[in-house]
Each structure stands twice: as C-alpha cells, then as structure tokens.
Amino acid sequence: MATGEEAGPAPRLLDVRTGRIGTVAGHRTAYAKSARGGPVAAGRLGLEGDEVGNRRVHGGPDKAVYAYAAGNYPLWGAEHPRHRARLVAGAFGENLVVEGLDEKTVHVGDRWRIGTALFEVCQPRQPCSTLARWFEDPAMVKAMVANGRSGWYCRVVEEGVVASGDMPGLEHRPKGSWSIAAVLRASYTPASAAELEALGRAPGLAAAWADWASRAARAPAAKPL
C-alpha cells in the first residue's frame, strides 16, 4: 500500500467452495463449485470434497487451492454486462472468495493463515478453455489475461480447517517477492530478458512458472505454461 493510502477492510474469507466432477459443454470438469457451510479440511492437494476433472493441467500441490478477490466480480460485471448475472461468487471455479485482497496486494510467497491452515501463494491462474465453455464465450479467456483479475493458487503448507468468516492473517512475505499483478505483467506483456530471469528466481513461485520464465529469458517466443 502506498504511503498515505487509506487502509481497506481487513481481509476476510467470505466463501469456501468445492465441486464434484461433471460436464460443461461435453467436457469433464469440476469447475462448478458450491458454497460449503461449516469447517472444511484443507489438505496438501486441496480442500476436502473438491475434485479435479483434468489432472494433466489442474490439481497438484502448486494448484491445491484457488483463491479469488471478491472485489473483482462487480468490475467484471460492469465490463461484461451480458454475463453480469453469472459474475458472482463461483464464477471462476474458485475455492476461496476473499474480501480485502486482490492481485496487487497479494504476493507470490506470501504465507496466509486462514483458520488453522497455512497457505502459500505460488502463482496466478491461467485462464483456459473451460472458462470459455462455462460462459459460452471464448472472449472471456483473453479478457482475464487483459484485465489481470486472475486470482491466485496456493499451496497448503500446514493442513487444517477453514470456514467462511475466517480472517486471513499474513504470517510471512519473502524479501524480493512479486505481486500477482507483477507476475502477470511480466508474463503476458513484453518483458526484458533481465526481468524474466528475475521472475524465474521469484521466491515461492510455482516451479512450472519459474521454469517457463527462465526459458523465456533465453527464448522470447516462449509462452506461459
């Protein structure tokens, strides 16, 4: 936060969501997620009851839990009025809906205590074809890249339980950390080799993303994984 800025609301977990595998436009996915009442266990591979439809590109320790900023929904709705009714909690297949945080204020490598679990932010979300199928609009993929409202994936460093109403607390931010917004800028807009090399060394960044950044520093035509 810049000096002199008025402090926003304290971070708060508004919603915990999980989903079972189903189909969207004929494709197997657990994108649709429903709100959960009461405590939900957070394990190394995700939340209890949250399934993964395509393990080739989803799931795993570096995509265990997907968090999204509550403040992003009205911005989406204003820009995409035809989808406004669907641009509410759950619109992006998220597990945690968080108030008071966003891509500018959350950094890769941050460790947030939510309930009794400890999460470590490790990468932005990369929009894929499932997002397009969900909204029946391929333009939504490019829109997420352009507006930077990606949300962020977390590792589960310490297993525990989370529940709506929990107040996230930042326990650690590594020196030299990159905000989610900064990672997105370096990844999706022209960046120098030096900047990409630095991104590849960003503390806490998911290994796949860091490997891509290091390769892109040497081969600018490389695309994010």
Image (tube, rainbow, N blue to C red):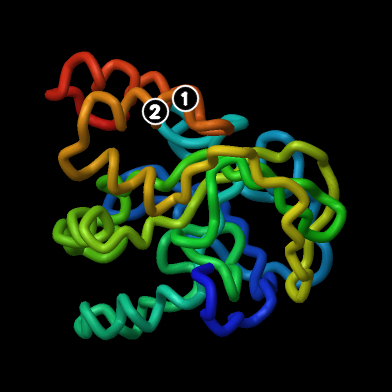
Picture mark count: 2
Q: Position of residue 28 (x, y in %)?
A: 39, 43
Q: What label does residue 198 carry, if any?
A: 2
The answer to whether residue 88 is left or right of residue 80 is right
Distance between the Cα atoms at labels 1 and 2? Answer: 5 Å
In the rendered image, the vertical position of residue 155 relative to residue 55, given as above or below: below
The answer to whether residue 104 is left or right of residue 51 is left
Q: Are marks 1 and 2 in contact (CB under 8 Å)?
A: yes
Q: Badge 1 local density, few (<14 within 10 Å), some, or many (20+)?
A: some
Q: Badge 2 local density, few (<14 within 10 Å), some, or many (20+)?
A: some
Q: Residue at x 53, y 73 (%)?
A: 3
Q: Residue at x 31, y 61 (%)?
A: 134
Q: Position of residue 135 (x, y in %)?
A: 26, 65
Q: Residue at x 64, y 71 (%)?
A: 15
SS for tag 2? helix
The answer to whether residue 27 is left or right of residue 203 is left
In the rendered image, the vertical position of residue 154 relative to residue 113, given as above or below: above
Q: Residue at x 53, y 68 (%)?
A: 1
Query: What amino acid is at disc 2?
Result: Ala
SS for tag 1? loop
Q: What label does residue 175 carry, if any?
A: none
Query: What amino acid is at disc 1?
Result: Arg
In the rendered image, the vertical position of residue 149 relative to residue 175, given as above or below: below
Residue that mark 1 sits on: 201
Task: Work out whether residue 129 or residue 113 is closer to the camera in this orientation and state it.
Answer: 113
